[in-house]
Image (cartoon, helix red, strand yellow):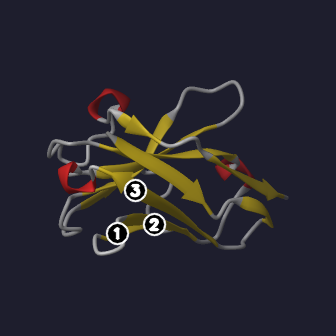
Amino acid sequence: QVQLVESGGGLVQTGDSLRLSCAASGRTWTIYDMAWFRQAPGKEREFVAGISQSGGSTQAADSVKGRFTISRDNAKNTVYLRMNNLKPEDTAVYYCAASNLAVGQSSRRQAYPYWGQGTQVTVSS
């Protein structure tokens, strides 16, 4: 099993930046792709960004391209989401996800069997 714990969320103002972290533990050697999703109140959970095992390939949702960057440090078993120029519509609970397969940084929730508990990001206008 793999356990994921997110951190770094908080309350910020429009235009501010945040960096989320997700630390993996357990059978970390089985982790391939990782991703960030988010869920706003009353909305479906949506894909934000994904990264391959090596970190050499990434994908991002159109809504965050140019503002959010996903990265990982395999020595620390940690994946990051750097969020710049935050907007009120970025307000959501952000979840870290991991797969034990190479899923091409899939945007499908079903591709990731492991999930963290989430961290709240609130952007005030």
Would you say the residues marked 1 and 3 are in contact, meaning their CB atoms lie under 8 Å apart?
no
Residues packed near mark 2 inside 10 Å, few (<14), some (14 to 19) or many (20 plus): many
> Sequence-wise, which precedes: disc 2 or disc 1?
1
> In the image, 52: left or right of 37?
left
> In the image, 64: left or right of 60?
right
Question: Given the current orientation, which residue lies at the most extreme front position?
Answer: 26
Amino acid type at mark 3: Ala
**Pointer 3: what residue?**
24
Secondary structure of the residue carrying numbered label 2: strand
> In the image, 51: left or right of 60?
left
Q: Is residue 119 above or below residue 87?
A: above
Residue 80 has which mark? 2
**Pointer 1: what residue?**
72
Quadrant housing the N terminus: top left
> Sequence-wise, which precedes: disc 2 or disc 3?
3
Alpha-carbon distance for marks 2 and 1? 6 Å
| Image spot of residue 62 (x, y percent) | 43, 51
Residues packed near mark 3 inside 10 Å, few (<14), some (14 to 19) or many (20 plus): many
Alpha-carbon distance for marks 2 and 3? 11 Å
Amino acid type at mark 2: Tyr
| Image spot of residue 37 (x, y percent) | 48, 43
Q: Is residue 87 visible?
A: yes
Would you say the residues marked 2 and 1 are in contact, meaning their CB atoms lie under 8 Å apart?
yes
